[in-house]
Amino acid sequence: MESYALLIGATLSAGTVLAIAALGLLINEKAGIVNLGAEGMMLCAAIAGFATVVHTGNTWLGFAAGMAAGALLAAIFGVLVIWLNTNQYATGLALSLFGVGFSAFAGISFVQAKLPELPKYAIPVLSDVPLLGPALFQQHPLVYLTMVLVAALIWFLYRSRAGLVLRSVGESPESAHALGYPVRRIRLAAVVAGGALCGLSGAYISTVYTPLWVEGMVAGRGWIALALTTFATWRPAHGWLLGAYLFGGVTMLQFHLQATGVQVASQLLSMLPYVATIVVLALISRNPTWIRINMPASLGKPFYPGS
């Protein structure tokens, strides 16, 4: 029973990484921007957050540093694709490659560094419930804040005027521009906000989820988060957290199977999260009409004022 509680708890933590990053990418895509640089932003944020915690001992300052790093890189990306009209896909890939190289260079001196021990978090009374207590109620506060973020984003997108404007910019930027909305500035704000969330996810990885610095430690989670936006068909209310925890659970399953002595090659187990991603995307792609209906109409397309 204890091993299952640990698996569930680890799944929530692993899913939080994906959920936060995917929320940031969703905000981008609702505004019509595809950012393939999530992996690079998360890596740069991971080393920024880790270095900050090493020097200050404060995890929340590490989160802030990670968000700042992600927002800065996203702002550069936004200026390139929104004002200079560079290709969004090529620019995003370049950002991802830059992040991989820069984080490796900046993190050389932090490879052996150690963070202060994290405090033990527990919700009184609930944390003592057998099985569910250790699994659900002894998590880092950011795990619960992520659930609040999802609910807040649902309200923002579908219940607020600002969310309606953001969606209109993604669906028909020409119409939004004709109504007097500053399409480029709205898109840049969405890109920066999305980058900050990707940065928060990266900082969470290096300071809480795996409190150490290793080159390339994001390990493809940025790409899985990108796939998660398609999995939820661009709507956070449609299985967003479920999808994040599904992918997170598959990631942790490999360690659970190894711990229980299942004789499977570790290389095959390491493939599980990525195989699951491909399988899910293949299943979703069988219904292209459903994707076309829910995908923002101007996704990945440049906007030319006055066109």
Image (cartoon, rainbow, N blue to C red):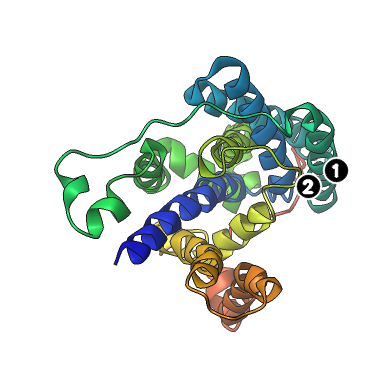
| Residue appearing at x 49%, y 64% in the figure | 232
* Up-down relation of residue 87 to residue 256 (above or below): above
Q: Nearer the viewer, residue 245 or 134?
A: 134
**Where is mark 1, residue-wise?**
86
Q: Is residue 236 visible?
A: no
Q: Quadrant of the C terminus?
A: top right
Q: Is residue 24 visible?
A: yes
Local packing at callout 1 (Cα closer than 10 Å; few below 14, some 14-19, many 20+) is some
Q: Quadrant of residue 140?
A: top left
Q: Residue 228: image x %, image y %?
A: 56, 61
Q: Quadrant of residue 176?
A: top right
Q: What element does badge 2 sit on?
A: helix
| Residue appearing at x 54%, y 52% in the figure | 18
Give how far apart the Cα atoms at labels 1 and 2 are. Answer: 10 Å
Q: Residue 99: image x %, image y %?
A: 79, 39
Local packing at callout 2 (Cα closer than 10 Å; few below 14, some 14-19, many 20+) is many
**Where is mark 2, residue-wise?**
92
| Residue appearing at x 52%, y 42% in the figure | 166
* Up-down relation of residue 94 to residue 15 (above or below): above
